[in-house]
Image (tube, grey):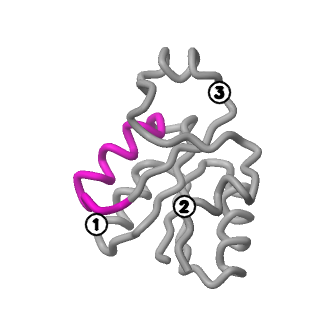
Amino acid sequence: MKILVVDDDVDFADGMAEMLALFGHHVHTAYSCDDCVAVSDKQEFELALIDVGLADRNGAECARDLKELCETVTCVLMTGYSADALAKMGVPAGEFDILRKPVKPEDLARYLKD
């Protein structure tokens, strides 16, 4: 799969990308929403794993921008925030799938195709 990992925690993003690459996926990282949009304007991804708490915009806004560029990408938000905190941040329940941090491999596996 072609996967985009978006997180302003560089160590987390790079670690997630390395793990996914070990399983044969083609992974690109972006460390901000602006980086995400810029790279997605040049190539398409099947899956985007996006941190909710990005420094430049929240992950839901980033996912919405990404979906405008590529309607077929599956956007999954990653967070440690509660559902109430997400709602206050403008992330309505049910709009996107949520992966809880720390991300467990078995939770991530359901989004990965061979």
3D distance between C-alphas at marks 2 and 1? 23 Å
Residue 95 is covered by the magenta coloring: no
Q: Nearer the viewer, mark 2 or mark 1?
A: 2
Residue designated by label 2: 111
The three-letter amino acid code for the residue at tag 3 is Tyr
Tell me the tag on residue 81: 3
Which element type, helix, strand or loop, lies under badge 3? loop
Q: Which of marks 3 and 1 is in front?
A: 3
Residue appearing at x 35%, y 61% in the figure:
73
- The residue singled out by tag 1 in the image is 41
Give the distance between the C-alpha atoms of the residues marked 2 and 3, in whole angstroms.
21 Å
Provide the residue span drawn in magenta. 57-73
Residue 38: % across, % down: 35, 62
Report x, y in % for residue 82: 64, 22
Tell me whether circle 3 and circle 1 mark residues in contact (CB < 8 Å): no
Tell me what residue is drawn at x 57 percent, y 15 percent. Answer: 84
The three-letter code of the residue at mark 2 reads Tyr
State which mark lies toward you, 2 or 3: 2
Counting residues from the N terminus, which is met first, the one under dot 2 or under dot 3?
A: 3
Residue 59 is a magenta residue = yes
